[in-house]
Amino acid sequence: MTTVALGVESLTATVGDTPILRGVDLELPFGQIHAIMGPNGSGKSTLCHVLSGRSGYGVGGTALLAGTTLLDKPVPERAALGLMQAFQYPVEVPGVSLREFLSEAGEALGLDPAEVGERVEREASVHGMGRFLDRSLNDDLSGGEKKRSEIFQMAVLRPKVVVLDEIDSGLDIDAVREVSRAVEGMRAPEVGVLLITHYSRILRYLAPDRIHVMIDGRIVESGGAELAHELESGGYEALRARLGLEAPPRAAAPKASDFFTDTPFDL
Ligand code: ADP
Ligand code: MG
């Protein structure tokens, strides 16, 4: 068995004629947590979308999940292979309880229903989710509770590769700390976690094995905790200067993407 949970090579993505990912290389071993950091608009969410199979992109390069090619598979097959994405904005599904959702998802993944039922009970008590089990999925949950729910769902469904897009966005500092602990708690020898974040604050509470910085659709630097410290003190501009990267062209007027940390269709 391969030790690489997710291997990405020369991954490119375009929307129409516009290149968004310009050749992403990444190796996430099983048992590790990697963080991808980058300014708004650098392509972080696009990387998630392309990995999980959202339509609308021209895609090139390769991505292997535990050695199996991903990019040629339809979305449900990617999930069945063990890919799970937590959304920046989890959708509310009135009328479908969290318990029903997990039972359906488990069935779709070919898990034993009794085993799923046991995991639901066990993990609900670990993650404090008992009182949400029979309520509609994500309905009337706070931002922090939604993130907690996503992590609980992963603990039940046990994907091989977890992609968390801006799991800290919109959370107050206590919720960031709680979510960080839960992510750290997902660390396991049979899982690889890819944590995407715009701010370095989440990295104060959890220790990724490696940090990658994405700028303009490429990973321009990888390193350890010192990279997060550099970004915290100098921002992305200082990193650009150190690496000799050109500053982004100044737009005449701010774009919507300057204010939102994700593309609007993620809502
Ligand atoms: P990040 O998540 O790092 O903030 P995104 O992956 O959301 O960045 O976006 C990367 C760039 O690609 C941005 O400039 C964004 O405006 C552009 N982009 C993303 N999706 C589309 C799309 N469907 N059509 C046109 N441009 C897009
Ligand atoms: Mg984003």
Image (spheres, rainbow, N blue to C red):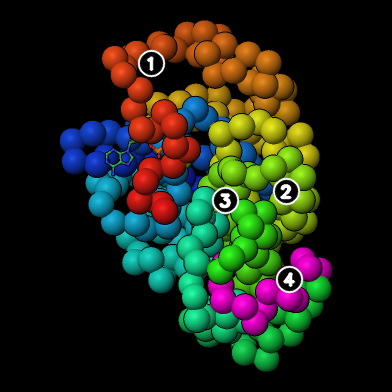
Question: In 3D space, how far apart are the residues under numbered discs 1 and 2 (Cα atoms)?
Answer: 33 Å
Give how far apart the Cα atoms at labels 3 and 1 are: 26 Å
Q: CA distance from mark 4 to mark 2?
A: 15 Å
Query: Toward which corner of the image does residue 258 lie, by quadrant?
Result: top left
Crowding at mark 2 (Cα within 10 Å: few <14, some 14-19, many 20+): some
Labelled disc at residue 175: 2
Split into 4 quadrants, where in the image is the N terminus? bottom right
Q: CA distance from mark 2 to mark 3?
A: 15 Å
As drawn, which residue projects farthest toward the bottom? Answer: 114
What residue is shown at x 38% (from left), y 16% (from top)?
A: 248
For image coordinates 77% across by 45% down, the residue present is 174
Residue placed under numbered mark 4 in the picture: 129
- Amino acid at pointer 4: Met
Disc number lying in front (4 or 3): 4
Identity of the residue furthest to the left in this view: 17
Nearer-the-camera pick, 169 or 71? 169
> Furthest-front residue in view?
140
Look at the numbered disc 1 and say if its residue's Cβ is closer than 8 Å to ligand 1: no
Q: Which mark is residue 248?
A: 1
Camera-side mark, 1 or 2: 2
